[in-house]
Amino acid sequence: SMDDDRHPVVMSAETVIAGGLPAFAIHKYTSTTPDLKQTSSLLRISLTRKLIESRFPSPTYKHHNDLSPVVTVAQNFDSLGFPADHPGRNRSDTYYINKDTVLRTHTSAHEADIFRQNASEGYTISADVYRRDAVDRSHYPVFHQMEGARMWDRRKVPGGNIAKAVRDDLAKMPKHDLEVEDPNPTIHPERNPLQAEHHSQEEVEAVAAHLKRSLEGVVVELFSKAKQAAAAANAPDPLNQEEPLRVRWVEAYFPFTSPSWELEVFWQGDWLEILGCGVTKQDLYINAGIPNHIGWAFG
């Protein structure tokens, strides 16, 4: 538990975090290590980020790429409704600088603040995140995440008609020729419920369609550029030329969205999950002081 003393202090106040960030008071909770450095300038990550951002243009979307990795416990956990006994809060899972301050474990640590600022209709966040994982083929203590969101304000759309406003925005978006498998209804009362106290079915159908078109466009951008790069380098095609680019939507559960989905791409003979997404839980908007908003999020 967080109250035990099994994790010793492993760094001094002068080396709380590499990179010149301000020092914090060291406490028995401190569990950070001095050799975790931000790696957001890595070329491949930067190129991928820019490709994804190109599908979410300014000024509708604001892109956040330089947010500090040092956040409060309230930002990282409380603002997102993590229960007090959630295992992610343990010092065995999270790097604590002191009892009130951590290295973010996900980009969503900044979500409530960005909602509260309400500076744009949409945003993306790209950042390194930190978890106390043992190093193996699929785990490392620092890795990168990207998330995004799009919102509409009932007070600002014509006539307060969210569904029409979202459909109008959808009509302006580029179409694609992806093969898309999406066999399930947008809403299912048990598997993928509507937030009925806040949203109408018509609104959610429109928001879901906008979300899916937006993220399908990301897939087209990323995988078409991969094919072009392979061709330019005379390298093997990363996608089988005989196979059309295929995606499928899978019902999912996430604590911050409902209804929710995972997006999978057919890649090298198997289905590869690339993201999770859904209609943002209204409580997040309410707690951030923007109760009249409705929208989607992915990560």
Image (cartoon, grey):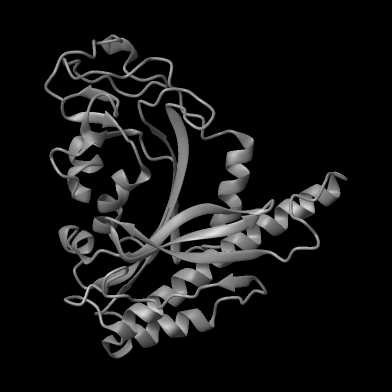
Say left or right for 96 vs 169: left
Q: Nearer the viewer, residue 139 or 175?
A: 139
Q: Is residue 230 left or right of residue 141?
A: right
State whether residue 84 is above or below residue 253: above
Q: Position of residue 159 (x, y in %)?
A: 28, 90
Q: Quadrant of the N terminus?
A: top left
Q: From what the image shows, is residue 273 above or below residue 279?
A: above
Residue at 19 percent of width and 45 percent of height: 82
Left or right relative to 142: residue 219: right
Q: Residue 64: in sight, yes or no?
A: no
The residue under the point 25% across, 40% down is 76
Up-down relation of residue 268 to residue 176 (above or below): above
Quadrant of res 25: top left
Query: How far from the left and from the top, in percent, is residue 104?
Result: 32, 35
Q: Is residue 31 visible in this depiction of the protein?
A: yes
**Horizontal and vertical percent position of residue 116:** 24, 57
- Identify the residue at the far bottom of this view: 159
Up-down relation of residue 46 to residue 185 (above or below): above
